[in-house]
Image (cartoon, rainbow, N blue to C red):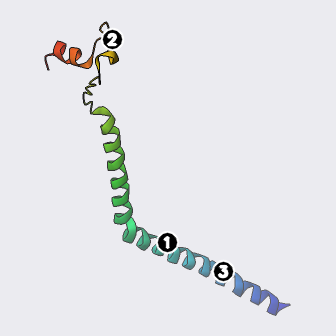
Amino acid sequence: MISAAVASTAFSALIWWAVPVVALLGAFTYVIWVSKFQDKFHNETNRSVTKFQSFQDSFRESKPVILIPQNETDTDPAEPTVADDLQKRGE
Protein backbone atom coordinates (compact mmCIF):
# COMPACT_ATOMS: atom_id res chain seq x y z
CA MET A 1 0.00 0.00 0.00
CA ILE A 2 2.91 2.31 0.64
CA SER A 3 4.19 1.87 -2.90
CA ALA A 4 0.80 2.96 -4.30
CA ALA A 5 0.90 6.11 -2.19
CA VAL A 6 4.43 6.88 -3.33
CA ALA A 7 3.46 6.35 -6.96
CA SER A 8 0.45 8.62 -6.55
CA THR A 9 2.59 11.33 -4.95
CA ALA A 10 5.17 11.08 -7.72
CA PHE A 11 2.46 11.30 -10.36
CA SER A 12 0.95 14.38 -8.67
CA ALA A 13 4.35 16.05 -8.57
CA LEU A 14 4.85 15.27 -12.23
CA ILE A 15 1.48 16.78 -13.13
CA TRP A 16 2.22 19.94 -11.11
CA TRP A 17 5.41 20.39 -13.15
CA ALA A 18 4.07 19.23 -16.53
CA VAL A 19 0.99 21.48 -16.70
CA PRO A 20 2.88 24.78 -16.22
CA VAL A 21 5.64 23.68 -18.63
CA VAL A 22 3.09 22.86 -21.33
CA ALA A 23 1.30 26.15 -20.67
CA LEU A 24 4.54 28.13 -21.01
CA LEU A 25 5.46 26.33 -24.23
CA GLY A 26 2.02 27.10 -25.63
CA ALA A 27 2.28 30.75 -24.63
CA PHE A 28 5.72 31.13 -26.22
CA THR A 29 4.52 29.42 -29.40
CA TYR A 30 1.52 31.75 -29.58
CA VAL A 31 3.66 34.86 -29.05
CA ILE A 32 6.09 33.80 -31.78
CA TRP A 33 3.23 32.96 -34.16
CA VAL A 34 1.49 36.30 -33.55
CA SER A 35 4.68 38.33 -33.96
CA LYS A 36 5.59 36.47 -37.16
CA PHE A 37 2.21 36.84 -38.88
CA GLN A 38 1.05 40.13 -37.35
CA ASP A 39 2.33 42.29 -40.22
CA LYS A 40 0.66 40.08 -42.82
CA PHE A 41 -2.74 40.23 -41.11
CA HIS A 42 -2.34 43.97 -40.44
CA ASN A 43 -1.58 44.67 -44.12
CA GLU A 44 -4.54 42.59 -45.31
CA THR A 45 -6.84 44.39 -42.87
CA ASN A 46 -5.63 47.81 -44.02
CA ARG A 47 -6.07 46.79 -47.64
CA SER A 48 -9.63 45.64 -46.97
CA VAL A 49 -10.48 48.83 -45.07
CA THR A 50 -8.99 50.97 -47.84
CA LYS A 51 -10.98 49.13 -50.51
CA PHE A 52 -14.17 49.56 -48.49
CA GLN A 53 -13.51 53.28 -47.97
CA SER A 54 -12.89 53.80 -51.68
CA PHE A 55 -16.14 51.92 -52.36
CA GLN A 56 -17.97 54.28 -49.99
CA ASP A 57 -16.28 57.32 -51.56
CA SER A 58 -17.46 56.26 -55.00
CA PHE A 59 -21.01 56.99 -53.83
CA ARG A 60 -20.04 60.38 -52.44
CA GLU A 61 -18.49 61.61 -55.69
CA SER A 62 -21.43 63.01 -57.61
CA LYS A 63 -20.78 63.35 -61.29
CA PRO A 64 -23.46 65.13 -63.32
CA VAL A 65 -25.21 62.92 -65.80
CA ILE A 66 -26.39 64.69 -68.93
CA LEU A 67 -29.19 62.95 -70.74
CA ILE A 68 -29.54 63.81 -74.41
CA PRO A 69 -32.84 62.88 -75.99
CA GLN A 70 -32.65 60.95 -79.24
CA ASN A 71 -35.48 62.91 -80.84
CA GLU A 72 -37.88 65.68 -79.95
CA THR A 73 -40.66 63.32 -78.89
CA ASP A 74 -38.52 62.05 -75.97
CA THR A 75 -38.71 65.32 -74.06
CA ASP A 76 -41.55 66.94 -72.17
CA PRO A 77 -41.23 70.74 -72.50
CA ALA A 78 -42.82 71.28 -69.07
CA GLU A 79 -40.24 69.05 -67.34
CA PRO A 80 -36.89 70.67 -66.50
CA THR A 81 -33.83 68.97 -67.93
CA VAL A 82 -30.36 68.44 -66.52
CA ALA A 83 -29.03 71.12 -68.88
CA ASP A 84 -31.55 73.62 -67.43
CA ASP A 85 -30.40 72.67 -63.96
CA LEU A 86 -26.75 73.26 -64.88
CA GLN A 87 -27.57 76.66 -66.39
CA LYS A 88 -29.31 77.73 -63.18
CA ARG A 89 -26.22 76.82 -61.17
CA GLY A 90 -23.93 78.60 -63.59
CA GLU A 91 -21.98 75.56 -64.70
Q: Which one is in front, 28 or 54?
A: 54
Res 47 → quadrant: bottom left
Res 52 → quadrant: top left
Q: Is residue 47 left or right of residue 16?
A: left
Q: Earlier in the sequence, mark 3 or mark 2?
A: 3
Whether 54 is drawn above or below 31: the answer is: above
Q: Residues within 10 Å of mark 1 (few under 14, many from 20)?
A: few
Marks 3/2 in contact by CB < 8 Å: the verdict is no
In front: label 3 or label 2: 2
In front: label 1 or label 3: 1
- Residue 76: mark in rendering: 2
Q: Secondary structure at mark 1?
A: helix
**Residue type marked 2:** Asp
Q: Secondary structure at mark 3?
A: helix
Q: Secondary structure at mark 2?
A: loop
Inter-mark Cα distance, 3 to 2: 89 Å
Whether 1 is drawn above or below 33: the answer is: below
**Residue type marked 3:** Ile
* Image quadrant where one finds the C terminus: top left
Which residue is depicted at the point 70% across and 87% down?
10
Which residue is depicted at the point 39% across and 68% down?
37
Inter-mark Cα distance, 2 to 1: 74 Å
Inter-mark Cα distance, 1 to 3: 18 Å
The residue labelled by disc 3 is: 15
Q: Which residue lies most toward the left here?
A: 90
